[in-house]
Image: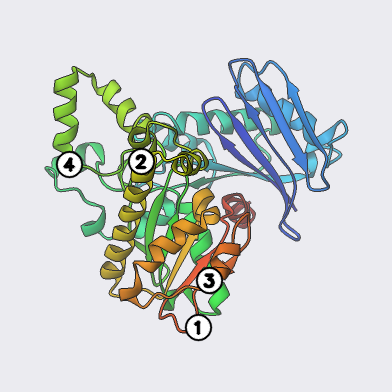
């Protein structure tokens, strides 16, 4: 059974074709700059690759390019699209309506449309991908929506409610939703598997650290809290996002600078975080280089982020009354051993003890348990695989 996994952005369309008989990736790629000038890039499992500039005015045209890449030319991996049994779509926001993955029909499309106000940049893009896929495949091919916040739907009210007048929850669904749920679900299940234990018997803290980052407390297989909130802006500082701050900071800056609501949104989402503090970049690799060159603001940005991560981990250990395992994932979580070491060294009060050599070697896609045998908490780095999680859900529902 072959499943196509799709992640549609406003001007992009990422894809992976996965053979579910052994869960291997046959091909993957990305249509970039849709609606602008258009580039499609891809590669196959056996090392073939391509890059082509092509006009892609919309996602339907982009899907046709994906179809051509998979079935024709030097990088073909299937004879026809009929070999694809089902399509799985990443959809960012399911609100409170969708608490698990669902097979897509007209009612689900309408439901995703109704939630666009909660994710105005992401949900419309996801709908574009779904509609383009229906146009190419027809309605006969099963399609499944996998929601980024669904894993967090088990949070209790005391964790997801905000202390603003209750009417805003009733009228506008203002509450904590959380994101990166597919990643947190994948790595928490992987930790239980590596430990040979039932996830329902474990307390796990999952740290997805990348340009966008979040931390989640998973108790007995269910999320009890997560750092991202009503939007992905909440939590700790990220590449360009501020993370949580005193709300009066927002109104103070807005008044002093004469900013509109849209300008404030841009400031906090795209100009803050590591970029805003360092003045250099949102990319951790650039931050590392700047620190090596003596940039004190870049060094401060890293210290701030790592300090905030430690606080979240500690608070989630308190929320769960203990922790059995901590796992790092995401681009930075998987590749910056120095960050993992710094955070873990400051968790000694929890009984965390790490093997420095094992930690240092666990980069570039390597999985490892880098806590010592004496450590009271098992600590892992596990590369996330959201596409595989989407494919598994799609297979189950197709």
Label 1 neighbourhood size at 10 Å, few (<14), some (14-19), many (20+)?
Answer: few
**Element type at marker 4?**
loop
Q: Alpha carbon of mark 3 to alpha carbon of mark 2: how far?
A: 30 Å
Q: Nearer the viewer, residue 290 or 362?
A: 290
Indicate which label's residue lies in the foreground, 3 or 2: 2
- Please indicate, yes or no, whether residue 177 appears anywhere in the rendered image: no
**Element type at marker 3?**
loop
Label 2 neighbourhood size at 10 Å, few (<14), some (14-19), many (20+)?
Answer: few
**Between disc 3 and disc 2, whose residue precedes?**
2
- Report the side of 67 relative to 103 (left or right): right
Disc 1: which residue = 373
**Looking at the rendered structure, which numbered label has been put on residue 370?**
3
Disc 4: which residue = 246
- Report the side of 320 relative to 73 (left or right): left
**Between disc 2 and disc 4, whose residue precedes?**
4
| Residue 17 position by quadrant | top right
**Between disc 4 and disc 3, whose residue precedes?**
4
Q: Alpha carbon of mark 1 to alpha carbon of mark 4: how far?
A: 41 Å
């Amino acid at each position: 059974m072959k499943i196509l996994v799709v992640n549609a952005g406003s001007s992009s369309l990422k894809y992976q074709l996965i053979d579910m008989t052994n869960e291997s990736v046959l091909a993957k790629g990305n249509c970039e700059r849709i609606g602008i000038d258009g580039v499609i890039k891809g590669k196959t499992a056996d090392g073939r690759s391509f890059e082509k500039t092509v006009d892609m005015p919309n996602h339907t045209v982009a899907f046709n390019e994906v179809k051509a890449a998979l079935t024709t030319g030097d990088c073909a991996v299937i004879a026809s699209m009929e070999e694809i049994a089902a399509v799985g779509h990443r959809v960012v926001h399911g609100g409170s309506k969708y608490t698990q993955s669902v097979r897509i029909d007209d009612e689900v499309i309408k439901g995703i449309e109704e939630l666009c106000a909660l994710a105005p940049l992401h949900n419309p893009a996801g709908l574009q991908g779904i509609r383009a896929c229906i146009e190419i495949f027809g309605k006969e091919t099963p399609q499944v929506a996998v929601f980024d916040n669904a894993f967090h739907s088990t949070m209790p009210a005391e964790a997801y409610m905000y202390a603003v007048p209750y009417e805003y929850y009733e009228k506008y669904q203002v509450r904590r939703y959380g994101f990166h749920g597919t990643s947190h679900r994948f790595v928490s299940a992987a930790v239980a598997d590596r430990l040979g234990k039932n996830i329902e018997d474990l307390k796990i803290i999952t740290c997805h650290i990348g340009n966008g980052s979040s931390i989640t407390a998973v108790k007995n297989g269910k999320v009890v809290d997560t750092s991202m909130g009503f939007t992905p802006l909440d939590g700790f500082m990220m590449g360009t996002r501020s993370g949580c701050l005193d709300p009066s900071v927002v109104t103070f800056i807005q008044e002093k600078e004469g900013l509109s609501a849209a300008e404030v949104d841009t400031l906090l989402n795209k100009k803050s975080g590591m970029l805003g503090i360092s003045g250099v970049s949102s990319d951790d690799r650039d931050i590392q280089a700047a620190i090596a060159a003596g940039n004190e603001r870049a060094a401060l940005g890293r210290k701030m982020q790592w300090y905030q991560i430690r606080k979240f981990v500690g608070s989630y250990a308190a929320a769960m009354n203990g922790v059995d395992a901590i796992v790092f994932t995401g681009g930075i979580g998987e590749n910056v051993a120095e960050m993992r070491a710094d955070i873990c060294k400051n968790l000694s009060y929890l009984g965390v003890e790490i093997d420095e050599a094992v930690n240092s070697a666990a980069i570039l896609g390597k999985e490892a348990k880098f806590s010592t045998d004496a450590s009271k908490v098992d600590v892992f780095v596990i590369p996330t695989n959201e596409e595989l999680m989407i494919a598994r859900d799609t297979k189950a529902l197709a």
